[in-house]
């Protein structure tokens, strides 16, 4: 059998082929590669430093658990944050994997539970207020995570969005010329006042396949399934299309995303006086464009419908 | 059998389904539809008026011959322009179909021949100067067509690029963030000085399938084959991908293109003082950024290599 040697150390057997970089790597050099890509993202976009307290959003998937692992290896102070969405066995398994990851490493993990706080799973919450589940879920995640960071004195919120996620999101935003999303699509969103914490995406330069290989080689158990609510989502279709483009022309995704971030995004940014004015929510203090923030409005609506509501 | 009635006249049998507009149309109402779409494009972008002399570039394909037919039906003054590219039987058939179209209708058709002028077909010209054939072909077409318009006193150059062509080209330009192409992608490019005629694309709002149906219903013979040089071209791959997106979400192509043209393109335009300065070519007078225009440089290179060269 033909053994391919690692292109970097030239000694060990290569076990992974990074098509994009024309690199065949052994486990050790691949590990170095991923660590360096994450560090590059953090530094390139000045996401945070070693004194900052980072709160990592973990879903139980490969990207977020891998990110938490990587941040700790790079010496950053990182706690975890998880939301139990109450989507049957999918959520049970997700929560179990996050807790297990934290316990084994003696890490701090903050868990909030949609069923405990609302008496309903995310699917039922969305149905009750007649909204798309993914939109309600995104909003609640952002809100609860920010709330937790404020309460626990964390400085930065980190999410596991990888290169493929970001390229896919850019693809959809360009296809529909979503000006506001294009202006805000960046791996660092600055803190706003005292009420909205900085948000960062340290996996911006790491592809989906690389992350899958990373957690597999590290032996980190993660949930394989996509969220059952995402079936048929356009984003999955866009991801598939970007993969087709990548097959035809290697590096398309990275180029598309990187040039946008470095050179093109500024074209979509609004002048400061055109940006929406933010003020603290009259109920919970989160920065919002309306008087009452989206999460508090949701609680009000649910209360009108007789659902429990819970703390903000 | 279930007969579907035309959605417009509600009398004749529908023979075509326009998915995008949720319209089933009979031949007569479909014909009206195409004519109105072309008129809409011409007026929306103020391409030309009834006094202007239009020179239509015809390749022998459905779009360009259909365009010529449509412009005449709309009462515009339109002559034809064709280039025999010297690509074997493909070019012979293209030229024959253009000549036949013009003769049957007693129209003026100007023909230039790459083999007559250069002693070589376009494939061999490109090989001789070590350039990609599609790039040389595009450059020569633009040059010779502009030259003919200047010589014959035409006001506007019209090409048969349809909605699919333009959406495809936009897709490729966005994917690679080709700033200069994005700034120039518009269905009207203004006249520059006395040396560069206005260029227009009146089929900007007519899809590829609609054009195929139009020429078929009108009984206009056209060449079915794609240019043999275009095999494996990225543009064909992009077209396929846009068709997949369209299947998932009707109207994607039109929306992507129209919002770009109406609202987003301005973001990519440069200030006037940043635009390249144009001056007449020292040999042929065509406006160019270099001293010698691309076509005259090609002739020089070919002459160095012993090829005939010919008139400019």
Image: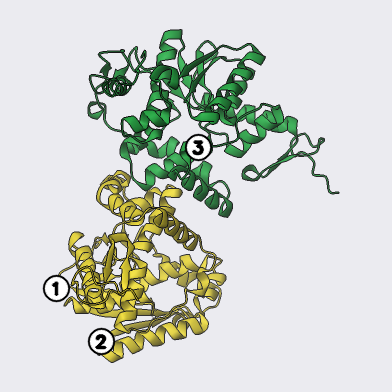
Chain colours: A yellow, B green
- Which residue is found at the position 26% from the left and 67% from the top? A202
The mark tally for this picture is: 3
Q: Which residue is mark 2?
A: A107
- Which residue is found at the position 29% from the left and 67% from the top? A203
Circle 3 packing at 10 Å, graded few (<14), some (14-19), many (20+), is few
Spatial distance from mark 3 to mark 2, Cα to Cα?
62 Å
Tag 3, which secondary structure? Answer: helix
Tag 2, which secondary structure? Answer: loop
Q: Which residue is mark 3?
A: B228
From the viewer's perspective, is residue B200 above or below residue A60?
A: above
Picture disc at residue B38: none
Q: Nearer the viewer, residue A302 or A15?
A: A15
From the viewer's perspective, is residue A285 above or below residue B76?
A: below
Spatial distance from mark 1 to mark 3, Cα to Cα?
59 Å
Chain under disc 2 = A
Residue at the left extreme?
A51
Q: Is residue A24 left or right of residue A128?
A: left
Q: Looking at the image, is mark 1 or mark 2 earlier in the sequence? A: 1
Chain under disc 3 = B
Q: Which residue is mark 1?
A: A50
Q: Nearer the viewer, residue A65 or A18?
A: A18
- Residue B218, how many percent across, how many down? 70, 27
- Residue A92, how many percent across, how many down? 46, 86
């Amino acid at each position: 059998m033909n053994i391919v040697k690692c292109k970097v150390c030239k000694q060990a057997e290569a076990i992974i082929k990074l098509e994009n970089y024309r690199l065949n790597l052994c486990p050790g050099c691949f590990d170095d590669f991923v660590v360096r890509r994450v560090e590059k993202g953090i530094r390139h976009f000045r996401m945070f430093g070693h004194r900052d307290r980072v709160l990592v959003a973990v879903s139980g998937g490969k990207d977020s658990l891998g990110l938490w692992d990587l941040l700790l290896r790079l010496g950053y102070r990182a706690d975890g944050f998880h939301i139990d969405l109450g989507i049957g066995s999918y959520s049970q398994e997700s929560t179990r994997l996050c807790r297990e990851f934290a316990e084994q490493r003696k890490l701090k993990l903050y868990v909030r539970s949609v069923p405990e706080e609302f008496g309903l799973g995310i699917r039922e919450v969305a149905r009750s207020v007649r909204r798309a589940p993914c939109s309600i879920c995104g909003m609640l995640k952002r809100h609860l995570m920010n709330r937790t960071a404020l309460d626990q004195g964390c400085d930065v919120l980190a999410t596991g969005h990888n290169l493929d996620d970001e390229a896919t999101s850019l693809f959809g935003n360009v296809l529909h010329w979503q000006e506001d999303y294009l202006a805000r699509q960046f791996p660092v969103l600055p803190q706003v006042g005292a009420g909205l914490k900085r948000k960062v995406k340290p996996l911006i330069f790491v592809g989906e396949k690389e992350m899958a290989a990373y957690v597999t080689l590290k032996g980190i158990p993660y949930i394989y399934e996509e969220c059952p609510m995402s079936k048929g989502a356009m984003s999955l279709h866009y991801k598939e299309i970007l993969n087709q483009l990548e097959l035809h022309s290697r590096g398309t995704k990275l180029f598309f995303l990187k040039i946008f971030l470095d050179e093109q995004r500024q074209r979509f940014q609004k002048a400061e006086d055109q940006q929406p004015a933010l003020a603290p929510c009259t109920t919970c203090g989160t920065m919002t464009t309306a008087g009452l923030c989206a999460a508090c409005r949701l609680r009000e609506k649910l209360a009108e419908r007789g659902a429990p509501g819970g703390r903000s």
